[in-house]
Amino acid sequence: MLTLATMVLLLFGVPCGLLVFAGQDWPAWVLGLGSAVFFFGALAYTRLMVLGHGRRHRDWAARIGDTTLGVIWVLFTCSVLSQFVRLALFLGGVSDPLRSRVTAGAAVLAAAVLLGWGHYEAMRVSRVRAVEVTLARLGAGLDGLRVVLLTDTHYGPINRARWSAGVVDVVNALDADLVCHTGDIADGTVAERLEQAAPLGQVKARYGRAYVTGNHEYFSEGQGWLDHMRDLGWDALHNRHIVLTRDGASLVVAGVDDRTAALSGEAGHHTDHAAALAGVDPDLPVLLLAHQPRQIDGAVAHGIDLQISGHTHGGQIWPFHYLVRTDQPALQGLSRHGERTQLYTSRGTGFWGPPFRVFAPSEITLITLRSGQTAS
């Protein structure tokens, strides 16, 4: 509670101090109005987040609270960075209160522009990000295999059923051999997000569709989402694998539960690489679905060739990515870990909470696998 209270105090208190009381010499009514907006805004935000994300789970409160979080985060960032404007004006000989008023105006204007652009980026259908990954052990018969990665769709308080259908249209136009979803499918239960998730049943893939849980499934009903994805025709890789074969070459597609699953209280849910790879031919290459990049240590230990993940959202709203990097080994893109294992981290297809993406665009990832072997 102390940590949360400190966070709210900083998020609302810093921009209030810098925009209202830092030498602007506003009239008394402006000082009063500004103070009231930030003070009551902080109280309302706290209450809305409890109502929206607590046991009552009110979608209307979550929508307002999440949007408020995005707005105040961007305003906080712009207020801090605007002090460089204040310094430049000071060096240029501009005195207060004009210097401080221009600084405050610049911060508010920059925040408004970033929020407008960030909202557009969050709500639009994700663009396709294409990447090629060479796997040394991949047989020549699977060279050019097209894998589409969806992750962090976060169907939630804002009804994005049309957006979901648009994403599926893009995926189906990619002529995928395999489509994967690496978790955080929704914020809420299957019953609450049924309409938004329904288009996933229309996803087309030549050889299969695979899904693993993320941490957000365990805030509601992890097993329920696994069951629902099976009902939609997906392979729910609950610590298990399937084998994809083409032209005499095979690829193991394995999946593990999210690293938070063991703490969820759902029986039988935990990360288990050994179970996921049970009975696998050790000479075959392995594509692993794991929600968090942080699960890469287990992949390296088990000789995985490529792990695909999400979770980070690429930071979602700059500069939050600096905090994400303190918890995760990768923010986005392709990276190598150990001698064999590669990791691809998606910036996510949807967004969590605040309906904004600032300098962290969403993506539908098209991964083309290339063979390290030559055809005989």
Image (cartoon, grey):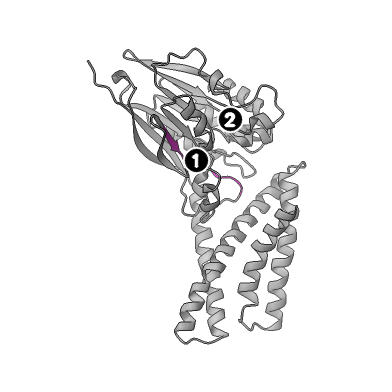
Q: Which residues are magenta?
A: 342-353
Q: What's the residue at 71%, 82% (across, down)?
A: 28
Determine which quarter of the picture holds residue 67. Answer: bottom right
Q: Position of residue 134 (x, y in %)?
A: 32, 30
Q: What's the residue at 39%, 29% (across, down)?
A: 340
Task: Tell me if residue 205 can be seen.
Answer: no
Tell me which amino acid carries mark 2: Thr
Tell me which amino acid carries mark 1: Thr
Q: What's the residue at 39%, 17% (across, down)?
A: 284
Determine whether the residue tagged by mark 1 lies in a helix, strand or loop.
loop
Kindly identify which numbered label has been placed on residue 190: none
- Spatial separation of the CA atoms under disc 1 and disc 2: 15 Å
* Above or below, comparing residue 227 to residue 323 in the picture: above
Q: Please tell me how crowded label 1 is: few (under 14), some (14-19), or many (20+) other residues with Cα within 10 Å.
A: many
Q: Position of residue 27 (x, y in %)?
A: 67, 84
Q: Position of residue 255 (x, y in %)?
A: 52, 24
Q: Quadrant of the C terminus?
A: top left
From the image, give the main secondary structure of the stretch colored magenta.
loop
Kindly identify which numbered label has been placed on residue 213: 2
Determine which quarter of the picture holds residue 189. Answer: top right
Determine whether the residue tagged by mark 2 lies in a helix, strand or loop.
loop
Task: Tell me if residue 348 can be seen.
Answer: yes
Does the magenta portion include 195?
Answer: no
Closer to us: 351 or 82: 82
Which residue lies under the disc numbered 1?
349
Q: What's the residue at 45%, 43% (across, down)?
A: 332
Does the magenta portion include 348?
Answer: yes
* Above or below, comparing residue 214 to residue 6 in the picture: above
